[in-house]
Image (tube, grey):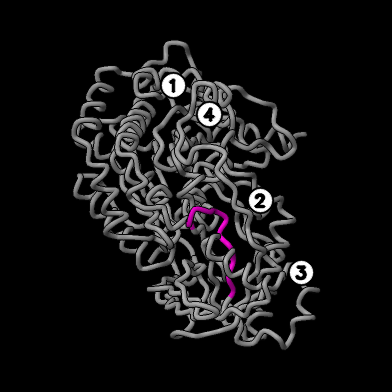
Amino acid sequence: MLRRVALIAALSLTLPPLAAATSDESADWGVMSRIRDEGLNHSQVMDTLGQLTDVLGPRLTGSPGLKKANEWTREQLEKWGLANAHLEAWGPFGRGWSYTHARVQMVSPSESPLVAYPKAWTPGTEGPARGKVVKAKLEKVEDFEPLKGKLAGSVVFLNDARDLTPPEKPYFSRESDQTLEEIARFPIPGARGEARPGGPPQRPNREEALRRIRFQKTLREFLKTEKVLATVEVSERDGGIVRVGGGASREPGEDPGVTGLVMAAEHYNRVARLLERKTEVELEIDVEARFHDEDRMAYNTIAEIPGTDRKAEIVLVGAHLDSWHAGTGATDNASGSAVVMEAVRILKALDLKPRRTIRIGLWAGEEQGLLGSRAYVTEHLASRPEPKPEEADVPSFVRRETGPLTLKPDHARFAAYFNLDNGTGRIRGIYAQQNAAAKPIFDAWLEPFHDLGAKTVTLRNTGGTDHLPFDAVGLPGFQFIQDPGDYFTRTHHTHMDVYDRIQREDLMQASVVMAAFAYNAAMRDELFPRKPLPKDAQPAPPAPAAKKPAKK
């Protein structure tokens, strides 16, 4: 009991007083009008988006494409007049990967091009190669034995054909008043929390995720030993949409296995039906892919608008800059990156003088487990011990956080983090992450934007993106409510995630709201209110005293 009391007392000395959420919280409508004018009448957000997508292209973490995007965003923020624009290294992330082309052709029983994309971190074919198609369900180690010695040179189809049914809802949608009212209501969460209405399904539990991850390594080793030419999986989407992510290890020295592809469902189904008819199918596959081992670190782009009387305190806005490789990462997440860049451009163009420093963070490695934002939090705000040896091969998104949470000095000076990462849809409100004291503040901040459709504040949690590492260490970290658009129906992790799927007016609206939230958080008399700290939090150890120089 005494240790606990002492710990609480120590923490109270390191943390700022938590601001009360009062009913007189308000926005400066004069400044809000200026932000609206700059963001709605002089926007540059689509120019930024076009550079990130059409010019720079896909931005897989570790790839040359993301490194070019890091450099361009740093230079652009510097041109707009932001201070301390730099790249912050973290890692090592592991091997980089990119591909130049992927061609899949059915050569018998008839000739036909097939639409397929390679899975990241799987090797290429070293030129065109032909193989007969074999369908094999390989879901557990016991499935391997009957196929040993029978797969050399083959193309293994790993799934059954997919049932393609007519869509039950429109591909593109907006949040209705009814849905927003439902989001605003707070349900008491179950044992595993709750999923956002209309959002992606919950991830599998930790044990199931670990089983799948470890089995995939065993499967890669088996396929390589059996000299399989390539594997093909069916896309989770239909309508010709290919949804594809990673498929092998990025660890140096670990064999990446064989070429892995994901094929459009309609084309995959055709091949599957031919096999059911006992018709022999032969494919020609030509994938050119390469690994990049010259720099195994990854980088976040950081820049800031310095504050005035409270410049040591930080308001952070951010989005992840990395993407998957089949499209150009427009809605996931060049849209969010362009919005937060436009937000700080607006504030700088208006020559506003925020009390606190407003910092922008463009994260790498979000798609591999929020790695860039986690690295930022660990470096600057709070950290836990390195994972235990038995957890070393466990991805961060399923790893158990163990050991005490050590707060760093900047933890006490951190105001709030605002994130955008749910596609092109306009902002309709914000998730308060069960921080009840935030609600009246957000209600006041949204009032100048009710006519733009942003008015809902919910105490619900939402997950899956870069506000979570901040929230996990007891800091105010928030993600906005956005219109779904066609994010979960067409673009999320697919080859259709391109510039054409972006809604210009939505990004302009989101940029204005983001700029306003950053400004308001920077101008409050007190830091933003916080939820209770994690129970195992402890203050940072004092810095060692400087040694006195030895007497001569």
Distance in Å between CA atoms under marks 3 and 4: 42 Å
Q: What type is the residue that disc 3 sits on?
A: Lys
CB within 8 Å, label 1 to label 2:
no
> Bounds of the magenta span?
231-241
Q: Earlier in the sequence, mark 1 or mark 4?
A: 4
Mark 4 Cα-neighbour bin, 10 Å: few <14, some 14–19, many ≥20: many
Instruction: Say left or right for 415 vs 145.
Output: left
Please name the residue shown 65% across and 69% down the image.
Answer: 158
Which label's residue is closer to the chain start, 1 or 2? 2
User: Which numbered dot is residue 532?
Assistant: none
96 with respect to 76 (left or right): right
Q: Quadrant of the C terminus?
A: bottom left
Residue tagged 3? 140
Q: Which residue is mark 4?
A: 432
Q: Alpha-carbon distance for marks 1 and 3?
A: 49 Å
Distance (Cα) linking label 1 and label 4: 13 Å
The secondary structure that dominates the magenta segment is loop
The quadrant holding residue 162 is bottom right
Residue farthest to the top, as pictured: 24
Report the front residue among 103 and 199.
Answer: 103
Which amino acid type corresponds to the residue marked 4 in the rendered image? Answer: Ala
Q: Say whether residue 310 is visible.
A: no
Question: As rendered, which of 107 and 390 lies closer to the eye?
Answer: 107
Q: What's the residue at 30%, 43% (across, down)?
A: 341
Which kind of residue does numbered mark 2 sit on? Glu
Q: Which residue is label 2 attached to?
A: 401
* Labels 4 and 2: the sequence-earlier one: 2
Give the residue number, with chain letter if any, for mark 1: 455
Q: How many marks?
A: 4
Which of the two marks, 1 or 2, is nearer to us in this view?
1
